[in-house]
Amino acid sequence: METNHHTTQQTEKEKNPNLEKISGIKMKSIGVLMTCPMHKYLEQQLETHFNLFKLWHCNSSITEFLKTHQGNTIRAVVGNTEIGADVELIASLPSLEIVASYSVGLDKIDLRKCEEKGIRVANTPDVLTDDVADLAIGLILGVLRGICASDAYVRIGKWKDADFGLATKFSGKSVGIVGLGRIGTAIAKRAEAFGCSISYFSRSQKPFANYKFYSNIIDLATSCQILIVACALTEETRHIINREVIDALGPKGILINIGRGAHVDETELVSALLEGRLGGAGLDVYENEPDVPEELLGLGNVVLQPHVGSDTVETSDAMADLVISNLKAHFSKKSLLTPVI
């Protein structure tokens, strides 16, 4: 989601007017390819400090676009969770040195190919953790307390005829988290403030966590009332939320997904909700974004968000600054701030 840059925030250029030249390198001459529209402030900063190419201006094939725009001069790619850097794009850029992702997720980047070709990769962890964790709690409250449904109830005038009805309490519920990384841990801390008991499933037990660990996701789903998906998307975690997990969560259980759409078998999720085998869901991500299963649109026990987990002005600006800082660090032969490879 695109937002306007907060006018009171000091830009990178204002902090240091000499950023165009670092270690004798003229940054403005370096070709950077942006794969799709992102945050406007990021686009402006890239245009200010680099020679920016915009892939979405392509009216033909990527190959033709790069031929026209001198693909061999492009030394960096800035992508996100929509379009990253796949094998085809990497092969089209013989001078590519770094992929800087405007996201934490890396599933749209061919990491193996990058490693093979010695291409650096950076992402934007930490700065978006709080926003995504906040939204997870918001989705839980939205589903359990019927916030969206009751808002609509007031707006269409039904309250004049009858009370809305009883909702479900969040405080004290048992919460299971799939993936106890930065975001999962932040969600756990927030849920603890509501008096919730916390348990989690992960590839391995976390030594820093005092929460109950489950080595089997079915056991986790069976033991909790609210299941939150917060892990990275890999081949192992694709459709990790399948029919068996959903049925273990049960008709009173709530599923929250702020990870990636492909974590959940969407066909099975829709089926479970329609058949009453699952109590409700709060979703910020979907398998085929921006397409959302039509069956979900009319369900009052489902809260839907358009993949806005990190979309606040403050966090979007911070993510953009981190992308720019990683690019500048690389081209000035310094260590990346948030390296992946």
Image: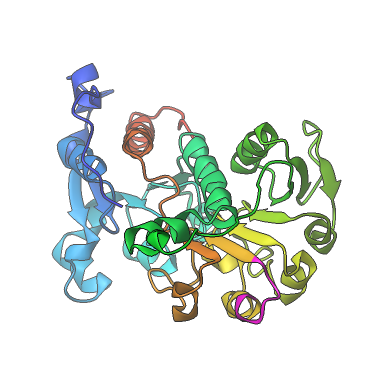
Residue 228 coordinates in the image, percent (x, y): 65, 53
Residue lying at 71% horizontally and 75% vertically, measured from the top left? 277
Residue 93 coordinates in the image, percent (x, y): 32, 59
User: Vertically, is 191 above or below 255?
Assistant: above
Q: Is residue 2 left or right of residue 177?
A: left
Compare residues 121 and 314 and report the one nearer the observer: 314
For the question of whether residue 109 can be seen, the reply is no
Residue 221 coordinates in the image, percent (x, y): 78, 60
Residue lying at 36% horizontally and 65% vertically, measured from the top left? 89
Residue lying at 69% horizontally and 56% vertically, measured from the top left? 227
Q: Which residues are magenta?
A: 273-279
Compare residues 172 and 50 and report the one nearer the observer: 172
Residue furthest front in the image: 161
Residue 149 coordinates in the image, percent (x, y): 46, 61
Queried whether the magenta region covers residue 173, the answer comes back as no
Looking at the rendering, which quadrant does residue 319 occupy? top left
User: Vertically, is 194 above or below 277?
Assistant: above
Compare residues 33 and 251 and report the one nearer the observer: 251
Compare residues 331 and 278 and report the one nearer the observer: 278
Looking at the rendering, which quadrant does residue 257 occupy? bottom right
Residue lying at 14% horizontally and 66% vertically, measured from the top left? 68
Looking at the rendering, which quadrant does residue 5 occupy? top left
Queried whether the magenta region covers residue 278, the answer comes back as yes
